[in-house]
Amino acid sequence: MAKYSLLPEQLIHEGTISQGNFFVPEMLPEERILRSHDANYWKALRSLTLDKKAQRKIGFPLSQELVDRERIICGGTVQNTEFALQYGCSMNIAGGTHHAYYSHGEGFCIFNDIIIGAHHLIDQHGFERILVVDLDVHQGNGTAVMAQGDDRIFTFSMHGDKNWPYKKEKSDLDIALADQTDDRTYLSTLDRNLGAIIDQFEPQFIFFQSGVDVLAEDKLGRLGLTVQGCRERDLMVLERCARNEIPVVINMGGGYSPAIRTIIEAHANTFRVAANLFS
């Protein structure tokens, strides 16, 4: 999508960040893939022999370029965790591949970069309380299932009730929102629940899935947020991270408004909020 090149151009042009704030992601090594995903699934991807039905579930035809792209996105999220530990916050302009499961992909997601990043923190830093705050309009179904049974990862998904995926999985906390939920209702619901989770779970690290497909004009969303409401959502999450000194990785997630300028403005707001809080 065009947003992946336009967003950094806009942020640099307006002076929110500089070229020096960017890093070039490295490709995720095989051992990290195998830590989080099924070996047979990875073998089929690596050899480009994944069956057609599985490819249709992902939504893209399988190619080496696609597999490499996903490995680079996930490698970037792992690097984000290290930068977040150093600077408090780090952001992936792509990422948020929350529909990928242990042994299959779907919804344009092949590997689950959030779970891969969480496993890196557990393995390399001994973290025991990692919170996933998934505010994309679509439920983080793959993330929910991949974290089940692991008390070190708490999954919180606030999403459209009647939106895809139509078969919802079970997160540690799911909040399904009615069509056309407005700013006031959304923000009050988020404020109440996020505060309770942080107080009770006391996370050492947060992954924030900041999809802007919650906007009223989004082609694939059914909620009713304004661009300003979406910015206030980001501020609500990131202020809590900064105030409680919880490192946070932000993945951009989805955004499908008809006007590209709306998508760029909403995503840019996430960076602007983060830059103000963590610079």
Image (cartoon, rainbow, N blue to C red):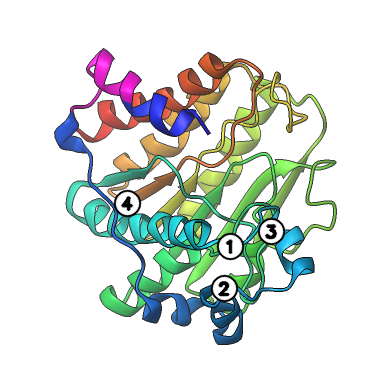
Looking at the rendered image, the disc whose residue lies closer to the viewer, 1 or 2, is: 2
**Label 4 is placed on what type of residue?**
Ile
Q: Is residue 104 left or right of residue 3?
A: right
- List x then y, in percent, for residue 114: 48, 60
Q: Residues within 10 Å of mark 2 (few under 14, many from 20)?
A: some
Q: Where is mark 1, residue-wise? A: 110
Looking at the rendered image, the disc whose residue lies closer to the viewer, 4 or 1, is: 1
Point out the tag, 4 or 1, that comes first from the N-terminus.
1
Q: Quadrant of residue 32?
A: bottom left
Q: Is residue 124 left or right of residue 259?
A: left
The dot on residue 45 is 2
Q: Which element is circle 4 on?
A: loop
Point out the tag, 2 or 3, that comes first from the N-terminus.
2
- Distance in Å between CA atoms under marks 2 and 3: 12 Å
Q: Quadrant of residue 43?
A: bottom right
Point out the tag, 3 or 1, that comes first from the N-terminus.
3
**Label 3 is placed on what type of residue?**
Ile
